[in-house]
Amino acid sequence: MSLYEHVFLARQDLSQQQVDALVEHYKGIIEAGGGSLGRVENWGLKSLAFRVKKNRKAYYTLMDIDAPSAAVAEMERQMGLSEDILRFMTIKVEAHEEGPSAMMQKRDDRGDRGPRGDRGPRGDRDRGDRDRGDRGDRGPRPPREGQSQGEGASA
């Protein structure tokens, strides 16, 4: 059997209990196909970067699956038919990660960089003190359209 990580997005107007019922339904499909479900993480209701099937938010759920490919294909087929599932993605992995996923870990693991990292007080916008070096003699500027050589040209 192969190892998979599967993430699906459920509609925003479902309740958490309905999302849990979806997980149980798809768990039954995997087990009927001879596989098993490992870790299941509910990441909660999150905003989407863009609308998906007229939804601005979705319930995210991660499942670790150990099953034959036929069972995963059947689960994906049924997810594609379900109106409650907006998107899903399955990735074959060599081994499942131990512990919580990156989405469930604390966000304050920035270390001692501070709130703006190591960019300094104004970040990369402060370019005024940078030495541009000698630009050399470029000669006079060519006249702009509608100007004669003598008017408006400055040194």
Image (tube, rainbow, N blue to C red):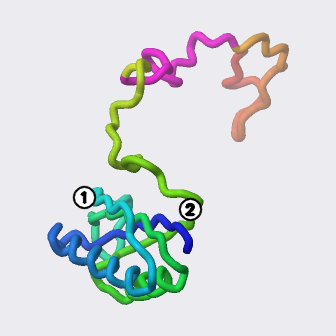
x, y percentage for residue 19?
23, 72
Examine the rendering and report whether any part of residue 46 can be seen: no
Question: Observer-nearest residue: 16 or 56?
Answer: 16
x, y percentage for residue 129?
58, 10
Name the residue: 18% across, 72% down.
13
Q: Amino acid at mark 1?
A: Gly
Question: Observer-nearest residue: 152 or 72?
Answer: 72
Name the residue: 33% across, 62% down.
40
- Count of picture labels: 2
Tell me which segment is drawn in magenta: 115-131
Circles 1 and 2: CB atoms closer than 8 Å? no
Q: Disc number at residue 25?
A: none
Residue 120 placement, left or right of 12: right
Query: Image quadrant of residue 80?
Result: bottom left
Q: Which residue is mark 2?
A: 93
- The C terminus sits in image quarter: top right
Question: Observer-nearest residue: 120 or 23?
Answer: 23
Q: Which residue is mark 1?
A: 44
